[in-house]
Amino acid sequence: MGALSPILRGAEDGGLLFFCPGCRAVHGIKVGAGAGPRWGYNGNPDAPTFTPSVLVTTGRTVDPNFKEEPGDPPAICHSFVTDGKIQFLPDSTHALAGQTVDLPLFSWGDD
């Protein structure tokens, strides 16, 4: 995983990684040509824009038999990443739902 900027990392599979302050976890997307879902990327690692929205689901949203435990990530994180800001949509199930904040410094123990 290589640093592209203080807020963006390149993944080994060619994707991009950013730290989500709502989930307090890393989210990843795939850009460019290839199999599977792909996002558009403006090419600016200091103020990235990804299109379309980024939707991350966990827990019961992907497995109805999932048993929630303290410390589990939010079930839904839905956002637009535009010009280095992350706009959390109201269907997100964390405290930042409905808010727009700057993408934070990448924080996942690799630096």
Image (cartoon, helix red, strand yellow):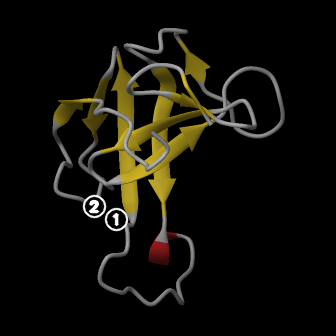
- 64 lies above or below 108: below
How dense is the environment of label 2, judged by Cα within 10 Å: few (below 14), some, or many (20 and up)? some
Measured from the top left, where is residue 42 in percent x and y? 52, 10
Measured from the top left, where is residue 91 in percent x and y? 30, 53
Instruction: Write the residue at 72% across / 30% down.
Output: 14
> The disc labelled 2 sits on which kind of residue?
Thr
Mark 1 / mark 2, whichever is N-terminal: 1
For the C terminus, the image quarter is top left
Tell me the quarter of the picture where residue 16 sits.
top right
Measured from the top left, where is residue 106 in percent x and y? 38, 36
Furthest-right residue in view?
35
- 2 lies above or below 99: above
Instruction: Write the residue at 31% across / 76% down.
Output: 71
- 32 lies above or below 2: above
Which disc, if any, is residue 107?
A: none
For the N terminus, the image quarter is top right
Q: In the displayed structure, does residue 37 sit left or right of residue 79? A: right
Local SS, label 2: loop
Name the residue that disc number 1 marks: 74
Name the residue that disc number 2 marks: 93
Instruction: Write the residue at 77% across / 40% down.
Output: 36
Furthest-front residue in view?
111
How dense is the environment of label 1, judged by Cα within 10 Å: few (below 14), some, or many (20 and up)? some
